[in-house]
Amino acid sequence: MLHWVESQSILGITLFIFGFCYVLTMVIFGAAAILSRRAVAKELKAASPVTLTPLAVILALLLAFLSSRVWTNVDRAGGYVGQEASALRQAVLLADALPPDVRNSLRESIKRHLQFIETHDWPAMGRGEANLQVIPGGLTDAMAAILSFTPAQPAQQLAQERALVAIEQALDARRDRTRLSQVQIAPVQWIVIIVLMVLILVTIAMIHIDNRTAMAATLSIFSTAVALCLVLLMIYDRPFAFGGVTMAPTTFREVAVE
């Protein structure tokens, strides 16, 4: 269910989250309105507003913790993609100093790796199915091509060493972005947020049970604020997914391989 929601557009995620929060609010308001006609309403009205403070603090801390982690992951995702693309571009440039057959083999291997990213790696990360068991053949072939000759000049030796380092950096960056594509807010964390939200809504309804206008206004304000926070978390939760605010492999398309 969560994967389906997060795979929608920003508008779709926003409508779903706000709809869910408002439906939950209306259910609690309706239940409170029914109870307000009964004798138990006076006992519920005795609930202290101070009860809201610890609940609100716990919810705020949880949202702040998750928001910090989510946006840190977004920054890391961009960094890993940039590192991998830069390393591949460096290997392409260093190929000019290598013998013609090695140069052509290296460029062809990098081109195949770029196609692998577009056709396999990125869709797999979007589905949350990317793993390190799939070895990028393009990069392994590029590494084999670099090691397949003995440098005849100091310039070739230097280019060979740096090209090998660039390919290793590309492998490390791909490994990092693959791991990051599997990171997301766990279902149990979403459940805790929803439970805390329900507890606060119920407490608000109890405090204002004898004043429906105040109860409706307060419930609406709180549910809107929480819905906004949940929308932000969900659209940024998986930077490599298909929905929300996601990254496209456009950076790799700038690695021109002639």
Image: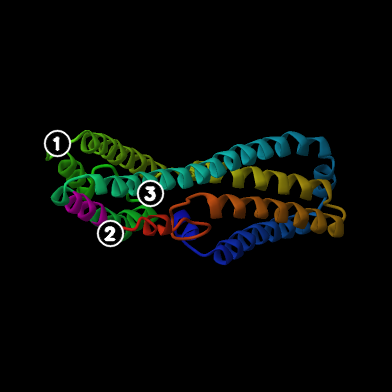
Name the chief secondary structure element in magenta: helix
Report the residue at 47% width, 54% height from top. Answer: 2
Magenta highlight on residue 117? no
| Residue 166: % across, % down | 31, 40
Q: Kindly check if marks 3 and 2 are in contact, taking CB atoms under 8 A apart as contact.
A: no
The amino acid beneath tag 3 is: Ala
Q: Which mark is residue 152?
A: 1
Q: Is residue 37 visible?
A: no
The amino acid beneath tag 1 is: Ala
The amino acid beneath tag 2 is: Gln
Crowdedness near tag 3: few (<14), some (14–19) or many (≥20) residues, C-alpha within 10 Å: many
- N-terminal of the pair, mark 1 or mark 2, is 2
Name the side, left or right, on which 60 lies relative to 248.
Answer: right
Q: Quadrant of the N terminus?
A: bottom left
Q: Which mark is residue 85?
A: 3
Report the residue at 36% width, 55% height from top. Answer: 255
Crowdedness near tag 1: few (<14), some (14–19) or many (≥20) residues, C-alpha within 10 Å: few
- In terms of secondary structure, where does tag 3 sit? helix
| Residue 240: % across, % down | 43, 53
**Residue that badge 2 annotates:** 115
65 to 258, vertically: above or below: above
Report the residue at 66% width, 48% height from top. Answer: 198
Magenta segment boundaries in residue numbering: 103-111
Q: How is the image coloured?
A: rainbow
Quarter of the image for residue 153 reads top left
Name the side, left or right, on which 97 lies relative to 32.
Answer: left
- In terms of secondary structure, where does tag 1 sit? loop
